[in-house]
Image: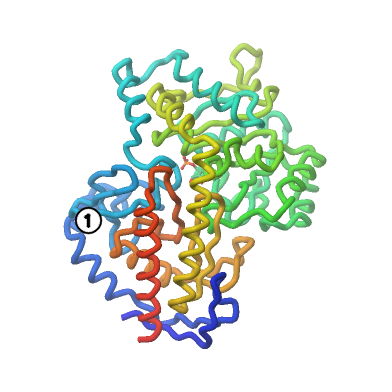
């Protein structure tokens, strides 16, 4: 039984700012038991997986206790597990499936591409098409180079920055995520971490003489924490004054604006890191940016910086990427944005009705439900309450909504009004359930 107590229940649609919640002694045993009853085949698969994969997975972020849902298939906005349970997928492979599962134009493009060959060593038409599409669409991208993941793209951007500045250290924001390469996750004297939305802290760190600042338009992994007005522009300009490269990681944010968030804000980074949606659902990453910086990797130049990868520019990925990006026009993004605003408001309203402290942060069609009473602007302001977050996640799965265990959700362009109603209805019931637990 979940147990917790609240000292005050005066919530508003924007959250419960006056509320002090005491969640201690929360357990999720009831939810876990229910989940186990519904998902015996997922459990059996997890037990088999445990023999051959550490913690039964190959991607840390996909594990959650007691064991993850084992997926059978996806179609449109729906996902089925191996027990036959259906979910609305609001995780969309961590924002990369902006058109949901099995999107017609992507599947057709993949069929044609696969029939022509699954891997080529040299240039091919789909490589040219996706490169042209991205260069034409994103103002900061004069030239581009493909990788197989956002992680690899961030590493390539780092190598370019070190090469051109002849400096080695970098600035990262607290709570930022640029993949799991050692430079971005392991403690290192070459990395200075500063709080997001704090220009003064950035200025002080820049004075040490760094190669680059890696920024995100919003901190995705830390809880979809938005940049304050003018912050990225200012950050970009003081970074240039310090002789460092400003590298904007748009791996998640590209889906939120037709010309990228940098295009929308009129901020011109030296390089942008790309991934997720540009591969149409297949593995991908890319670095785009200033011609002179990208040309550091040009094999035609004496002393160039080599960058290779057996699957870089893979024809299936490139073909899927072209189809997905063509379908993600400004009008589609506007609809996604409106629907996400509607979902955010409905979740806040449901939380208010259930008297559960909730703040919903949102960047375009990516949202994060925080079980806390004030809006976080930097990672240190995100309240750590893993038991409650886990309880909400399990309650949502039981209601047929497949969200990120940490509280993130995002929409896909193929969702119908009925899907949106299912999502908001599920949140309302799950939050009522948490409320019941608080009262218990
Ligand atoms: C902002 C950001 N950068 C980089 C990455 C790493 O991309 P990948 O998982 O493709 O390596 C991610 C992945 O979630 C991301 O969100």
Q: Is residue 85 above or below residue 240?
A: below
- Looking at the picture, does residue 84 appear above or below residue 107? below
Which residue was labeled with disc 1?
85
Q: Quadrant of the C terminus?
A: bottom left
229 to 399, vertically: above or below: above
Residue 203 visible, this angle: yes
Q: Is residue 83 left or right of residue 21?
A: left
Left or right: residue 439 versus residue 308 is left
Q: Quadrant of residue 66?
A: bottom left
- State the colouring used for the structure image: rainbow
Instruction: Look at 58% across and 25% down and name the residue there.
Output: 144
Residue 182 seen by the camera: no
Q: Secondary structure at mark 1?
A: loop
Residue drawn where x is 60% and y is 65% of the image: 376
Give the farthest residue toward the right: 241
Q: Position of residue 362 (x, y in %)?
A: 55, 56
Q: Position of residue 76 (x, y in %)?
A: 32, 43
Q: Is residue 240 left or right of residue 56?
A: right
Q: Residues within 10 Å of mark 1 (few under 14, many from 20)?
A: some
Q: How far from the left and from the top, in percent, is residue 349?
A: 48, 70
The N terminus - image quarter: bottom left
Q: Is residue 34 left or right of residue 54?
A: left
Q: Residue furthest front?
A: 417
Asked where in the image residue 319 lies, by quadrant, the reply is top left
In the picture, residue 294 is in which quadrant?
A: top right
Q: Is residue 406 above or below residue 114?
A: below
Q: Give the image location of residue 424, x and y in percent.
A: 40, 62
Observer-nearest residue: 27 or 424? 424
Residue drawn at (39%, 86%), measured in percent from left and top?
439
């Amino acid at each position: 039984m979940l147990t917790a107590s609240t000292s005050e229940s005066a919530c508003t649609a924007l959250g419960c700012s006056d509320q002090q919640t005491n969640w201690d002694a929360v357990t999720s045993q009831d939810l876990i038991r229910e989940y186990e009853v519904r998902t015996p085949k997922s459990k059996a698969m997890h037990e088999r997986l445990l023999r051959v994969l550490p913690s039964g997975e190959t991607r840390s972020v996909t594990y959650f206790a007691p064991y993850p849902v084992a997926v059978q298939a996806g179609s449109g906005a729906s996902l089925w597990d191996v027990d036959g349970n259906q979910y609305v997928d609001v995780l969309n492979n961590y924002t990369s499936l902006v058109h949901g599962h099995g999107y017609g134009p992507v599947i057709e493009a993949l069929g044609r591409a696969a029939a022509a060959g699954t891997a080529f060593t040299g240039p091919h038409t789909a490589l040219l098409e996706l490169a042209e599409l991205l260069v034409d669409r994103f103002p900061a991208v004069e030239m581009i180079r493909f990788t197989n993941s956002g992680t690899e793209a961030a590493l390539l951007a780092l190598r370019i920055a070190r090469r051109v500045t002849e400096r080695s250290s970098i600035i990262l924001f607290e709570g930022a995520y640029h993949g799991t390469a050692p430079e971005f996750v392991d403690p290192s004297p070459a990395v200075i971490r500063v709080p997001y939305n704090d220009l003064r802290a950035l200025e002080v760190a820049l004075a040490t003489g760094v190669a680059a600042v890696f920024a995100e338009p919003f901190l995705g992994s830390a809880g979809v924490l938005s940049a304050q007005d003018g912050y990225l522009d200012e950050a970009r300009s003081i970074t240039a004054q310090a002789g460092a490269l400003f590298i904007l990681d748009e791996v998640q944010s590209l889906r939120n604006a037709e010309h990228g968030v940098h295009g929308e804000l009129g901020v011109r980074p030296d390089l942008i890191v790309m991934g997720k949606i540009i591969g149409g659902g297949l593995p991908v990453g890319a670095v785009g940016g200033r011609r002179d910086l990208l040309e550091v990797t040009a094999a035609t130049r004496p002393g160039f910086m080599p960058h290779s990868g057996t699957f870089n520019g893979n024809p299936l990925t490139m073909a899927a990427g072209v189809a997905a990006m063509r379908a993600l026009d400004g009008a589609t993004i506007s609809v996604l944005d409106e629907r996400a605003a509607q979902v955010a408001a409905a979740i806040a309203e449901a939380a208010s009705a259930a008297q559960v402290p909730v703040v919903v942060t949102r960047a375009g069609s990516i949202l994060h439900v925080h079980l806390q009473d004030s809006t976080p602007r930097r990672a240190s302001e995100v309240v750590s309450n893993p038991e409650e977050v886990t309880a909400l996640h399990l309650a949502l799965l039981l209601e047929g909504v497949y969200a990120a265990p940490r509280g993130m959700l995002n929409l896909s362009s193929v969702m119908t009004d009925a899907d949106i109603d299912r999502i908001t209805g599920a949140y309302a019931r799950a939050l009522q359930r948490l409320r019941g637990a608080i009262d218990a």
